[in-house]
Image: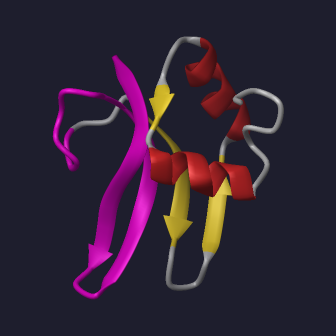
């Protein structure tokens, strides 16, 4: 099963996250299938590759709660999830 989840990057006390499509059984910093976005909670910046995210959702990928919340802010899931 594929999940859309956050992968931690950056320095100590300066975390930034990549939003990745990754196998559900792998660890947080494991090898990802594809990078689909970027999230910086300190600067409150988000960059999403919406066509790729929608492709993975059509194939059955499950977003984590945090990724779903981030995507809803950018209206990525508008009309695709309940």
How many badges with numbers are in the image?
0
Residue 57 on the magenta segment? no
**Residue at the image point whose x is 74% and y is 43% from the top:** 76
Q: Is residue 8 left or right of residue 48?
A: left
**Residue at the image point whose x is 57% and y is 46% from the top:** 68
**Residue at the image point whose x is 55% and y is 11% from the top:** 59
Which image quadrant: the C terminus? Answer: top right
**Residue at the image point whose x is 33% and y is 53% from the top:** 7
In the rendering, at what x and y percent does residue 45 appear? 63, 73
21 lies above or below 41 = above
Between 35 and 23, the one nearer to me in the picture = 23
Q: Residue furthest front?
A: 82
81 lies above or below 30 = above
In the rendering, at what x and y percent does residue 35 appear? 47, 41
- The magenta-colored residue range is 1-30
Write down the quadrant of residue 33 in the picture: top left
In the rendering, at what x and y percent does residue 20 appear? 43, 42
Residue 21 on the magenta segment? yes
Q: Is residue 26 left or right of residue 68?
A: left
Q: Residue furthest top?
A: 59
Q: Is residue 57 left or right of residue 35?
A: right
């Amino acid at each position: 099963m594929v999940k859309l989840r956050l992968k931690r990057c950056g320095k100590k006390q300066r975390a930034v996250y990549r939003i990745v499509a990754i196998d559900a059984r792998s660890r947080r910093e494991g090898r990802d299938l594809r990078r689909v976005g970027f999230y910086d909670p300190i600067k409150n910046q988000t960059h999403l590759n919406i066509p790729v995210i929608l492709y993975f959702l059509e194939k059955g990928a499950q977003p984590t709660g945090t990724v779903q919340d981030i995507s809803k802010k950018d209206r990525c899931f508008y009309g695709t999830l309940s």
